Image: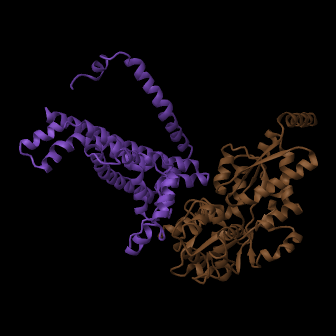
Chain colours: A brown, B purple
Amino acid sequence: MQIRNLTIAALASVLALIAAGPVKLLNVSYDPTRELYSQVNAAFAKQWKAKNGVDVQISQSHGGSGKQARSVLDGLPADVVTLALAYDIDVLAEKGHLLPANWQTRLPNNSTPYTSTIVFLVRKGNPKHIKDWDDLVKPGVAVITPNPKSSGGARWSYLAAWGYALKKNNGDDGKAKDFVTKLYKNVPVLDSGARGSTTTFAQRGIGDVLLSWENEAYLALNELGTNKVEVVTPTMSILAEPPVAVVDKVAAKHGTAAVAKAYLEFLYSDEGQEIAAKNYYRPQSPQIAAKYADRFPKLTLFTIAELFGGWQKAQKRHFDDGGVFDKIYTPGT
Amino acid sequence: MSNSFLKRASILPGFGPALGYTVLYLCLIVLIPLSAVFLKSVSSSWEHLWRTVTAPNVMAAYRLSFGASFIAGIVSAAAGFLIAWVLVRYDFPGKAFCDALVDLPFALPTAVAGIALTSLYTENGWLGRYLVPLGIKVAFTPLGVVVALTFIGLPFVVRSVQPVLADADRELEEAASSLGASRLQVFTRVIFPMVGPALLTGFAMAFARALGEYGSVIFISGNLPMKTEIVPLLIVTKLEQYDYAGATAIAVVMLLSSFLLLLGINILQRRTRRFMEADQL
């Protein structure tokens, strides 16, 4: 019975392919991946066409990671999601039942084809001498970072600062909280997404240091020029793992499950890894990583699993309503 | 005036279909979407809702949203009245241009307004570089919120006062001055009562618009919790945390309070109109 259904489905999708022309995929992603995925899409379409003789048209959608996940939850027909953090895809599994709860085990490296970290972008010449996390809590230093309640990247930044303080103070939770509280006292503007903060820092000239995704920092550097800003890599930061997944329910409906899976697997191929590295995402493949080693300064990276017990826990304790982040702004509660 | 509502309405034919259409239209466009908000908010426990709408950062946001909107409404009313006065009473080159300029905040996407105002008022902006050394910080402060809301509210006041002022009978003013009234008296006793209700309408519209404004404010406010977060931003933040019930609960609080305020202003307006009509007879 099931086999017959599958055959019918396969036949139907083949017929649909012939009838509808190119296969269409929608990749719903987070803010700073625009450039990465426009290159990946072109390369993948070329490869798929050579292999299967079928055109693939991949559309991209970008925005704050949380907002993007919510759009998918509300019915945006994403065949694949490539978001800033696992928690946002967990929500799709949990609340929307759009993909199985064990989605993260379906692809290698926790479904994370490339990693990144949080670094600092400072003004040319580094006038405030910002070298490491400790320099961010000094009085008179204005730090730009988005609101972690709405931005995935900002959550990584927050946890990076917390993790740094934890490690430096031998796991003293109270001291970590003090450190992060002090850091956010130095934040004059909280934008809602990573791109917004980059604009605030780069275009409007506000703040002394921007906490940024590594790739976003280098992108800003290339766009603004080395005579305007500099990238500072701290001694220690968090290993940011932006995961990818096929949205099973949507892909099944569109008949795109196979091509969607191939699309994500392409990210792990040498070609995909190289595109990631060129866009300043740290590749998983050791060979490609070695080839582009000069692009990625060495630093100590800790993981969210190691220090925070995973996203679910971190989200609950720090970013949910009434969590630690809220308390930073409401002293005495 | 004392005729009953129905008696008066029956003079004009077509009352039934017109009222029916009005009710249907209001239901479709206003009531049904709003009741969907109510329904969605009750999908959570009362305790959760109560805690959400009374959380300290939400309370701070109510204060900012209502306070800044009120101030912006007052400023818009004062400036809008002056602009309407100039546009109606004087002739000058470029008048049509100025008149068209007033409507621009209506048409401009509010995000554009927000970005423009922000880059104007930040430390190295055109205005900000002179204001910040004087200790006046506009961008990323509650003052910035007021500035953005004033920008948005201006045309409402001008466009509601202008026609009333244009229709106002200037003979009344002349009569008043020939009877020995001073200029101030003419203004306070003759002109102001005529345009008062229209000014109140303009204020109410500017105020209501400011309460709901999102696009322009989020750029200039800085969005710091407890300091410069407006209520609409909190609603969006809650949505981003998948807290639909919490978001709609805050929306319901805003809806109810806005409705009560607008109702109050409407009643006040009727009173002043009735009072003034009685006064003139």
- Residue sitting at the far left: B180
B68 left or right, relative to A229: left
| Residue A109 seen anywhere in this rendered image of the structure | no
- Residue sitting at the far front: B93
Q: Position of residue B262 (x, y in %)?
A: 36, 42
In the figure, residue A298 lies in which quadrant?
bottom right
State the residue in front, A160 or A79. Answer: A79
Q: Position of residue A172 (x, y in %)?
A: 63, 79
| Residue B155 seen anywhere in this rendered image of the structure | yes
Q: Position of residue B91 (x, y in %)?
A: 28, 45
Quadrant holding the N terminus of chain B? top left
The structure residue drawn at horizontal position 34% and vertical position 55%, both measured from the top left corner, is B71
Relative to A325, is B114 above or below? above
In the figure, residue B138 lies in which quadrant?
bottom left
B24 left or right, relative to A137: left
A145 left or right, relative to B205: right
Q: Position of residue A164 (x, y in %)?
A: 66, 77
B194 left or right, relative to A240: left
Quadrant holding the C terminus of chain B? top left
In the figure, residue A275 lies in which quadrant?
bottom right
Relative to A137, is B5 above or below? above
State the residue in front, B97 or B221. Answer: B97
The structure residue drawn at horizontal position 77% and vertical position 75%, both measured from the top left corner, is A296
